[in-house]
Amino acid sequence: MIKVFKLLNGEEIIAKTEVTGLGYTLSDPAAIVIQQTEKGVGVGLAPYMPYAESDITLYASSIATEGTPAKNMANEYNRIFGSGIEVTIKDIINKIIEISNKEIKVKWDSSKPNGDLKRLMDTTKQIKYDILPEISFDKALKNVYEFYSNTTK
């Protein structure tokens, strides 16, 4: 699970986390930094302790507060640090409807179990073997829709 932390020393971190008895184990941690951009002040991400050989431990006693990152922050972290883009099933359906240029009304059956509400692909091995996708999720979804639209009748 990706979480954001504000440490007692004022630093802010975003990382893939695993709860431990001492606090958290952080994978691919990034410091959240304020930076000047062409549009004004913005937020950037920088590797946090990039010299560590493996995951790091974040002790609970050093955390001022923690939370779930905003979707756009999590997506930017995933884009840079490689765990994929988080997308809800509803988002995927809406994108397919948009791509189709059809007026489709989705009827959700609330009597059925929810199942997975969202997907977040772990691209650790793709990074390791340098085989990350070269096109966006939206473009890939459009390509798949067009392929099946053109090959099935």
Image (cartoon, rainbow, N blue to C red):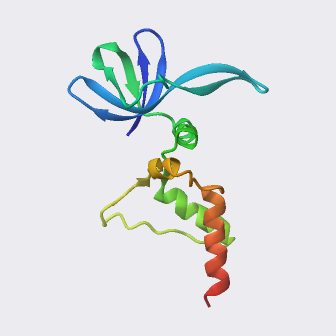
Name the quadrant containing residue 63. Answer: top left
Residue at the farthest top position: 9
Q: State the residue in front, 121 or 130.
A: 130
Q: Position of residue 34 (x, y in %)?
A: 62, 19
Residue at the farthest right position: 38
Residue at the farthest left position: 21
Q: State the residue in front, 140 or 130.
A: 130
Q: Position of residue 135 (x, y in %)?
A: 66, 57
Badge count: 0
Residue at the farthest bottom position: 153
Q: Give above or below for 144 relative to 23.
A: below
Q: State the residue in front, 101 or 57.
A: 57
Q: Residue at x 47, y 22 (%)?
A: 49
Q: In which quadrant is the C terminus drawn?
A: bottom right
Q: Is residue 39 left or right of residue 139?
A: right
Q: In which quadrant is the N terminus drawn?
A: top left
Q: Give above or below for 140 relative to 19.
A: below
Q: State the residue in front, 139 or 26.
A: 26
Q: Give above or below for 100 relative to 71.
A: below
Q: Position of residue 18 (x, y in %)?
A: 31, 35
Q: Residue at x 66, y 69 (%)?
A: 143
Q: Residue at x 57, y 26 (%)?
A: 46
Q: Examine the rendering and report whether any part of residue 120 can be seen.
A: no
Q: Examine the rendering and report whether any part of residue 149 can be seen.
A: yes
